[in-house]
Amino acid sequence: MIPFDDRGLLLGDGLFETLLARDGVLVDLEAHLDRLAAGCATLGLPTPDRGEAERLMRQAIEGVEAPRAAVRLTLTAGSGGRGLDRPEEPVPRLFASAAPSAVPEGPARLILSTVRRNEGSPASRLKTLAYLDNVLARQEARARGANEAVMLNNRGEVACAAAANLFWVREGRLFTPALTCGVLAGVMRARVIAAAAGLGVEVAETAAEPGELDAAEAVFLTNSLVGLREVAALDAVAYGPSRLAERLARALD
């Protein structure tokens, strides 16, 4: 049981990682634990023991009777008194959960969300427990008949989807928002950039206005659970299949 004075529960003070378990294998485990450790350094939290983190995740997937599982590792700042200040020596709380995760069917349909990313906040580049903006953006997408929402930052630049990184193709080049736009350094994002380099495809990490997406030939989403998912439309703008996205998907597999 999580106690009522847990700082993750009360203040969103903590981090999480979501990764794919495929046939019992924790995919990209080390990359996810590296990102968790980097987030702990930014937040000033002790880094959890990697062996214990892996043990908890493996224990979580034992009860999932499916070839694919979404595994969530959650780290809170532990218990604390009233107010914002942490104890002098915080004792973080670490736990894991898992659930079946099916591959989504077909390309995604997106909307441009009214919810903005705060690119000036360190939290915009971390998977913190304060994820309400993403929840609201996804809720807006569902209400408008879409799968996902594209979020802009406060400068009006393209940042990401509610639960995915964003890429687009134009004139044979691959583009993705720069991390300075308030973007999470996605594990799959890094793999796509590396795969593109291996294919000899130029990748530009850029600050782009939403009009860049209107002019794109193709758009796709990436995260650790879906891998690479092509986009059919963003609001009224439609996109066709992308040979480059297909090549990248094969390279990732």
Image: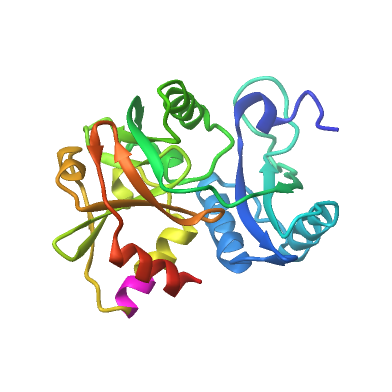
Chosen colour scheme: rainbow
In the picture shown, does residue 80 fall above or below 71? above
Q: Residue at x 81, y 32 (%)?
A: 2
Residue 24 falls in image quadrant: bottom right
Choose between 35 and 64: the one closer to the eye: 64
The answer to whether residue 177 is visible is: no
Q: Main secondary structure of the magenta part?
A: helix
Figure quadrant of the N terminus = top right
Residue 196 is one of the magenta-drawn residues: yes
Choose between 52 and 26: the one closer to the eye: 26
Instruction: Describe residue 126's horizontal placement relative to residue 29 as left or right.
Output: left
Residue 253 screen position, x and y as percent = 51, 71
Residue 152 screen position, x and y as percent = 29, 34
Numbered range of the magenta stretch: 194-198
Q: Which residue is drawn at 55% across and 40% down?
A: 128
Instruction: Describe residue 51's horizontal placement relative to residue 167 as left or right.
Output: right
The answer to whether residue 49 is visible is: yes
Q: Which residue is drawn at 66% across and 33% down?
A: 8
